[in-house]
Image (cartoon, rainbow, N blue to C red):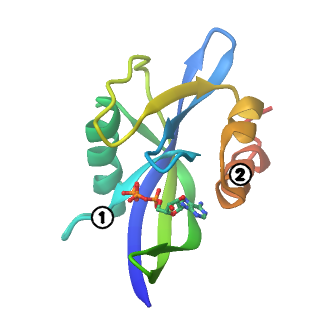
Amino acid sequence: MLEERSAGTILYQESPLGKVYLLLNYPSGHWDFVKGNIEKGETFRQTVLREVREETGITDIDFVEGFEDKVEYHYQRDGQVIHKEVIFFLASTKTNDVVLSHEHRDYIWLNFNDALKKLTYKTAQKLFKKVKDLGFES
Ligand code: ATP
């Protein structure tokens, strides 16, 4: 089976109404956090910094220490089953404006409950709920 590995982040900013989280609309239709393939020689965090910059134009991100988790799934490409692992961090930004690349259709900043509903995949929702379990979201 082919193996694929990406790294990404749950990215939030403080808004007047509390924390809002960034979701992207992927070309295949799903809504998920910012992520992307790990390039050779990169640490997971370096991948996240690069992908956030490339996919959103955001360059100021602060990692929340102590949060690192993994989402796993299988999908098919050209008749091949691919096992994918995505390492996720939690990070904040002070930037509100997002400049999308051609890799995504749309973006949205949502509060925790709305973001949880918007996420397409159960695996991503499960990851996101751990942010609440941390006591990070009151
Ligand atoms: P990357 O952002 O890592 O470069 P990508 O845009 O190439 O990724 P994915 O977002 O991993 O691709 O999507 C590849 C396939 O896997 C799509 O068919 C998508 O619907 C499916 N997929 C994406 N995330 C999940 C998930 N959490 N659980 C199950 N299937 C998923």
Q: Which element type, helix, strand or loop, lies under badge 2?
A: helix
At horizontal 46% and vertical 45% (from top left) the residue drawn is 26
- Expressed as whole percent of the image width and height from the top left, the position of residue 54 reads 26, 40
Q: Position of residue 8 (x, y in %)?
A: 44, 53
Up/down of 2 relative to 27, above or below: below
Q: Which residue lies most toward the left here?
A: 41
Q: Residue 5 appears at what percent x and percent y?
A: 39, 71
The answer to which of 115 and 9 lies nearer the viewer is: 115
Q: Residue at x 57, y 20 (%)?
A: 14
Residues at circles 2 and 1 in contact by the CB criterion of under 8 Å: no
Residue 38's disc is: 1
Residue type of the residue flagged with mark 1: Ile
- Side of 126 relative to 28 (left or right): right
Furthest residue toward front: 79
Residue 94: image quadrant is: top left
Q: Earlier in the sequence, mark 2 or mark 1?
A: 1
| Residue picked out by circle 2 | 125
